[in-house]
Each structure stands twice: as C-alpha cells, then as structure tokens.
Amino acid sequence: MGKPLSFNGFAPDFVYRGIPAPDLTIEQVVGLGVTFTHEALRAHTSAFGDVLCTGR
C-alpha cells in the first residue's frame, strides 16, 4: 500500500520526468518529440499491425 496507481504499466509521474538539455532550441525539442512519436508508432505497428485504438 502507499504506491501510486499505475496507468497502462507506466508510473503516474512518467510525463514529468526530465533530462537536462541546456543547448537545445525549442525547434529541436519539438523535432525530437516528432521523431520519438514516429518511432513509437512504428514500433506499435511492428508489434500489433496497423490497428491503433485511440479510445474514440
């Protein structure tokens, strides 16, 4: 008891974890976000096929 509830296997503070990146511009951060999103979608497609449930 006393543990935070998990969401789909991730710790609830997952989104709030950060790393120091003092030399990156906003454009670079956005570009990295887009790249990581594409890679996550590619990995999902590889594991589960083209079906992506968005909860709608």
Image: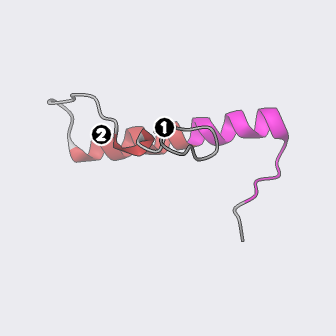
Position in image of residue 5 (x %, y %): 54, 45
Disc 1 residue crowd, few under 14, some 14–19, many 20+, Cα 10 Å: few
Three-letter code, disc 2 = Gln
Q: Is residue 44 left or right of residue 8?
A: right
Describe the element under mark 1 as helix, strand or loop: loop
Task: Specify whether residue 41 is painted magenta.
Answer: yes
Describe the element under mark 2 as helix, strand or loop: helix
The earlier-in-sequence mark between 1 and 2 is 1
Disc 2 residue crowd, few under 14, some 14–19, many 20+, Cα 10 Å: few
Q: Residue at x 72, y 71 (%)?
A: 56
Task: Specify whether residue 44 is painted magenta.
Answer: yes
Position in image of residue 29 (x %, y %): 31, 41
Q: Residue at x 30, y 34 (%)?
A: 18
Q: In this figure, which residue is indicated by the disc labeled 2?
A: 28
Q: Is residue 29 left or right of residue 10?
A: left
Q: Residue furthest left?
A: 22
Q: Is residue 46 left or right of residue 29?
A: right
Q: How many numbered markers are drawn?
A: 2
Q: In this figure, which residue is indicated by the disc labeled 1?
A: 3
The range drawn in magenta is: 38-53
The color scheme shown is secondary structure
Position in image of residue 33 (x %, y %): 42, 43
- Please tell me which residue lies in front, 10 or 51: 10
Three-letter code, disc 1 = Lys
- Pair 1/2: label in front: 1
Q: Residue at x 23, y 46 (%)?
A: 26
